[in-house]
Image (cartoon, helix red, strand yellow):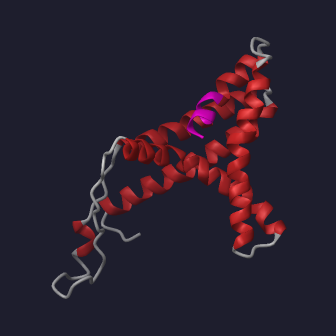
Amino acid sequence: MVVVGALAFPVMVLREQGIGSWVLWVELPVLILGSGSVCLYFVLAQREVGNSWIRTLLRAPALMALGAGLALSNSVAVVRGLAGSVGSFVRTPKSAATASVSTATAPAAYRPPFDWLLLAEVGAALGFALAWWSALNEGMWLGLPILSLFVAGYGYVSALGLSQVWRARHGMRA
């Protein structure tokens, strides 16, 4: 999904300029296999929990956007796992977890790191927003739906990450 997103706008520009008209025959199967399988997974998962077909189809774009937004962190996790990098399990402190810790001091002790992955997600959100705006201005209508999914997904994931960091730094509970 990360590769599909990264190549979406350059391929749109090539196709619009007439340079890569043959690219459609490569792009279409990759897009169908890449996003079609994810869409099918989300639709079947929603049906399994008992949602109606209408509700399932209405939720599919939001779920696909969320999947696109999580693609970068999921890809990093897969690469780390394949490389044998085992992360450490860190339990997040809870309020009133023990009698010796007061609820007033527990949230201040935990500060989530402001890591490079969050910066990459914010950068991806801004980059896809710029690509979306450029596609809109150039009249590349066919690419707008897929770019919209990436803008919404990365925008949502980065907004959540930034809000968690901001709340932790200001001593607020989530």
State yes or no: residue 9 in magenta. no
Whether 9 is drawn above or below 65: the answer is above
Q: Nearer the viewer, residue 87 or 109?
A: 87
Q: Is residue 138 visible?
A: no
Give the x, y percent position of residue 90: 27, 63
The residue nearer to you, when weighing 22 against 82, is 82
Tell me if I can see residue 115 in this picture.
Answer: yes
Query: The N terminus appears in which quarter of the rendering?
Result: top right
The image quarter containing residue 44 is bottom right
Q: Residue at x 74, y 61 (%)?
A: 43
Left or right of 77 in this view: 27: right
Question: In this rendering, is residue 106 above or below 79?
Answer: below
The question of residue 2 being in magenta is answered with: yes
Counting from the top left corner in percent of width and height, residue 156 is at 56, 53
Q: Give the residue at x 77% y 14%.
A: 17
Identify the residue at horizontal 78%, vertical 24% (top origin).
24
Residue most toward the bottom? Answer: 99
Q: Residue furthest right?
A: 54
- Identify the main secondary structure in magenta: helix
For the point 68% across and 38% down, the residue is 147
State which quadrant residue 131 falls in: top right
How many numbered discs, if any? Answer: 0
Q: Which residues are magenta?
A: 1-7
**Residue 162 higher or lower than 130, as above or below:** below
Considering every residue shown, the one lying at the far left of the view is: 100
Q: Is residue 96 above or below residue 47?
A: below
Q: Quadrant of the C terminus?
A: bottom left
